[in-house]
């Protein structure tokens, strides 16, 4: 038995993606549990992922209300990087901004439920792609900071999706795309935009991911610790931040800070 507050799934890119579930101080290897019946029980306790204090309700994937309205990683510009206000001197934590936002970022194309454009900090490649459940991805270009990546992405997203249909992603239903050809098309169409923002060219390596899934669901229904604190089901696989069971799926990142007994 393992018990502790949940954190987002940790992954490592091998021939088959390897997953671990952080429960408190313990890292539980999940791949060996696929095909087995397991029980996940939410004890009713929730702990803020920032302060560690016990809270009644979590905001923004595991934060107390106080942390949610003060921490820089919970600011609106994290989900809308084009709104970054570091240069105006109003960042919630300039030191945090230096380490996370004022760093090289990659703009990429990936195939999840279909083709999408996205951004991530350079050091988060390929973790970001795995977290989203991408089956393959390619870097478009590199820029100097998060704000610039957002300004470029928002223009490309006017012609291309920037969201994932999470149900299709979990059913492994996607439209295959020639990423190298699509990258060349994007460069041709947005060459003026890239020139304006002084982007850096990157390699054409295509990342592919093979997720540890024995069987994908034909119909997706979700487990929710707030509505049902006990999940007792056979683990069929893992993709993105989701545990895929025989009768339902659960996004473990959504329940960060929830104390869970495995």
Image (cartoon, rainbow, N blue to C red):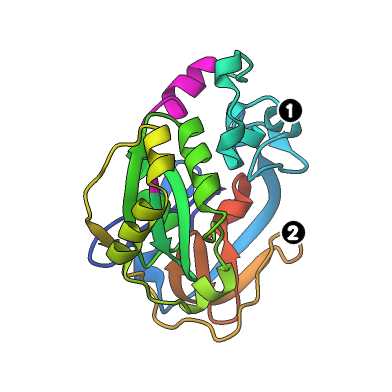
Distance, label 2 to label 1, CA atoms, is 21 Å
**Quarter-of-image position of residue 85:** top right
Q: Residues within 10 Å of mark 1 (few under 14, many from 20)?
A: few
Residue 70 at what x, y percent from top left?
A: 68, 24
Residue 18 at what x, y percent from top left?
A: 32, 60
Residue at (36, 32) in percent of width and height: 198
Direction top: furthest residue: 89
Tell me the residue that label 2 is attached to. 226
Q: Is residue 242 left or right of residue 197?
A: right
The verdict on residue 228 being magenta is: no
Q: Residues within 10 Å of mark 2 (few under 14, many from 20)?
A: few
Q: Is residue 212 left or right of residue 88?
A: left
Q: Is residue 180 visible?
A: yes
Point out the frontmost of discs 2 and 1: 1
**Mark before the other along the chain sequence, 2 or 1:** 1
Q: State how many labels appear.
A: 2
Q: Is residue 76 left or right of residue 152?
A: right
The verdict on residue 98 being magenta is: yes
Residue 60 at what x, y percent from top left?
A: 67, 43
Residue at (57, 54) in percent of width and height: 158
Residue at (63, 27) in percent of width and height: 71
Please report the bounds of the magenta region as a residue range: 94-107
Tell me the residue that label 1 is attached to. 66
**What number is the disc on residue 8?**
none
In the image, residue 51 sits, relative to residue 202, either above or below, namely: above
Q: Is residue 132 visible?
A: no
In the image, residue 59 sits, relative to residue 218, either above or below, namely: above
Residue 89 at what x, y percent from top left?
A: 60, 13
Residue at (70, 63) in percent of width and height: 229
């Amino acid at each position: 038995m393992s018990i502790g507050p949940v954190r987002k799934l940790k992954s490592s890119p091998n021939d088959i993606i390897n997953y671990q579930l952080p429960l408190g101080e313990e890292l539980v290897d999940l791949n060996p549990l696929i095909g087995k019946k397991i029980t996940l029980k939410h004890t009713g306790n929730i702990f803020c992922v920032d302060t560690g204090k016990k809270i009644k309700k979590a905001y923004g994937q595991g934060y107390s209300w106080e942390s949610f309205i003060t921490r820089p990683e919970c600011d609106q510009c994290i989900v809308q990087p084009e709104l970054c206000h570091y240069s105006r001197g109003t960042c919630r934590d300039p030191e945090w901004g230096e380490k996370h936002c004022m760093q090289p970022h990659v703009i990429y194309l990936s195939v999840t439920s279909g083709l999408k454009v996205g951004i991530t900090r350079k050091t988060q490649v390929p973790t970001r792609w795995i977290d989203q459940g991408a089956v393959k991805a390619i870097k478009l270009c590199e820029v100097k900071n998060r704000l610039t990546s957002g300004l470029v992405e928002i223009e490309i997203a006017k012609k291309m999706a920037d969201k994932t249909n999470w149900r299709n992603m979990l059913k492994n239903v996607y439209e295959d795309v020639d990423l190298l050809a699509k990258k060349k098309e994007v460069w041709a169409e947005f060459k003026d935009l890239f020139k304006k923002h002084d982007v850096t060219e990157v390699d054409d390596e295509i990342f592919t991911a093979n997720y540890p899934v024995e069987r994908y669901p034909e119909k997706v229904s979700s487990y929710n610790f707030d509505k049902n604190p006990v999940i007792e089901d056979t683990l069929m696989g893992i993709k993105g931040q989701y545990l895929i069971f025989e009768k339902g799926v659960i996004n473990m990142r959504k329940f960060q800070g929830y104390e869970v007994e495995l």
